Image (cartoon, rainbow, N blue to C red):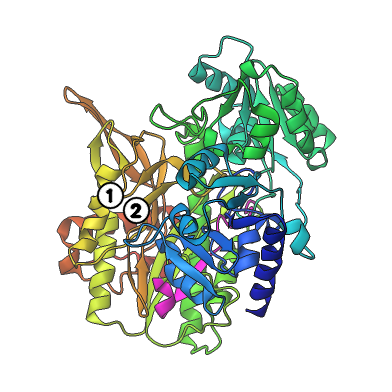
Amino acid sequence: MKNIEERLSGLRSCLKKDSIGAFIIPSSDPHFGEYIQKHFACREWLSGFTGSAGTLVVTEHRAALWTDSRYFVQARQELQGSGIELMKMRFAGTPTIAEWIKREVGNGSLVGIDPMLFSKGEFESLSAELYPLKLSLKDDLFNEIWGERPPVIFSPATIQDISLGGCDSKHKLNLVCQKLNIENDLLYILSSCDDIAWLCNIRGADIPFNPLVLSYAAFTKDKIYLFASREAFSKDQASNLKNSGIELCNYNEFQEFIKEFNQDYVRVAPIDKISVKIFNNSVSGGATFIADPIRGGVTGSLKAVKNSAEIEGFKKAMLYDAVAWVKFWIYLEEELQRGSQNLTEEILANKIGEIRGEYSEYKGESFSPIVAFGENGALPHYSPFGNGPVKVVGDGFLLVDTGAHYPFGTTDTTRTFAIGNLTQEQRKDYTLVLKGMINLSMARFIKGTRGASLDFLARGAVCSAAKIYTHGTGHGIGHNLCVHEGPQSIRMEENPVALEPGMVISNEPAIYEEGSYGIRIENTILCKKWVENKYGEFYEFETLTIVPIDLTPVDKQLLGPEATQWLNNYHSNIYEKLSVILNQKERDWLAVKTLNID
């Protein structure tokens, strides 16, 4: 905590010098994705809070951090003794950032932000909320106070084969132009690295857990300009890009490039994905904001609706990942059976990555693995790294949430394993979580249905025990892209985006008992067409994940006959698909794990 105090003091000295009353530090980089390089982890460095979402505000005498329900317990632990106050977002009595700042500083004070880390949309809304206080744009103060700051890293890039993505960049550009009804010589700007990766069929390793290239892009109806590290692409790759209608430019040339265009002909997509600094320096004046043509929204999404090649790729990825899960589960049981006293969460987290690494197609984890035993399972985004060794011994639940990237797809799976003896309440909770997951898996619904309309199918079983989980039930998943991908979701909060055939979504109800245990069971599901009749077009879900579910804690009577039949069919399907590619030992083990519940 001494380091935290010194760092806060260093920032406050900078603020005092520039007459800044409060400074806001978000968890973002100039591209506003979920994960960021260490170079941009200013909020983590300054506060000690390691969660992926949170905003820190520092004034002359106080500091506070806002984060959501996924991180309440973790933030309380990591902020302890720092002097930084935890603010629980969306909880009654918690002030907004603007409300808190206005109470803390005088009316004439300036509120500082780094203009590269706030989007134009965030800037506009924050300015309105803070009025009459004014925002002051301060370029990267952390260069002054963060010694040995990690540099920005550009890694070698790859070009996705058309057999994996289903279509080339020229075709994708045509799809985007059709959606935008492009007729004139307009210039469209993209700052979101995953949109750019999709459009240009490129992948990289510049962002942790996301196979992305740090990049900007601009396109006309005929051509794409890609701004990335030239050194990240070989000469052959640059030539391939050129043949696909993509001109490779230097990452740092982006702002100057935009300035050359008449701003009346510039379009920016969207307002929440371009930094204030780039907008003010390069795109101000007559530039117009439009909806994201790739991520989409209520008008449909080009990226989220997977084509047949992408869907087949997902299924192949699930097959590879299922074999890794089988090997992992066997390893876990063998270690427990031999009475290992040294088995830890961290060892298990590393083990599944090690097993996946046996396949040359494995390209890395799709998010930091969550391996949580006992009370740690109650932390939805718990990390087994950096907290000291936590042994997996005794009775309780072991929650394992992990995923991987393959060239042909991305996975995200959670299984909760029974370790030792369980209480009756634990068995009941486990069964209700499983029942909720199955209820959503069996859903059939009419075209136009939104995720919020389906959420209670999963959440309802948990609510029947007068319990609740506060995170969403489902998020979109990218095709060898971001494991958390919009615009679709399944959650309590309203999202106007309707589910469409081709959308891939997680299905992950849960129960968390703070200080005791956590249970989450997650499959990946695909929205697909079911039937069409005089009443309209109806959809259903196909479960893509083929990883066995621990049957030890299941209460068959509570689960009910319909869900039990679904579970039996699910396990029969798993055995049929996996048994032909497993060795005899693994096949015998799987036969036991996938037995029907009588």
Q: Residue at x 58, y 63 (%)?
A: 59
Magenta stretch encompasses residue 583: no
Q: Indicate left or right for 415 with 193 as reference.
A: left
Q: Residue at x 41, y 38 (%)?
A: 503
x and y, in percent, of residue 103 in the image = 46, 59
- Asked whether residue 465 is in view, the answer is yes
Q: Quadrant of the C terminus?
A: bottom left
x and y, in percent, of residue 309 in the image = 51, 34
Place residue 519 in its image quadrant.
bottom left
How far separated are the C-alphas under marks 2 and 1?
Answer: 6 Å
Residue 576, placed above or below residue 416? above
Q: Earlier in the sequence, mark 2 or mark 1?
A: 1
Label 2 sits on residue: 473
Of residues 445 and 419, the one nearer the viewer is 445
Q: Indicate left or right for 406 with 511 as reference.
A: right
Which amino acid is tagged 2? Thr
x and y, in percent, of residue 470 in the image = 33, 60
Q: Do the residues bearing badges 2 and 1 touch, measured as CB atoms within 8 Å?
A: yes
Label 1 sits on residue: 455
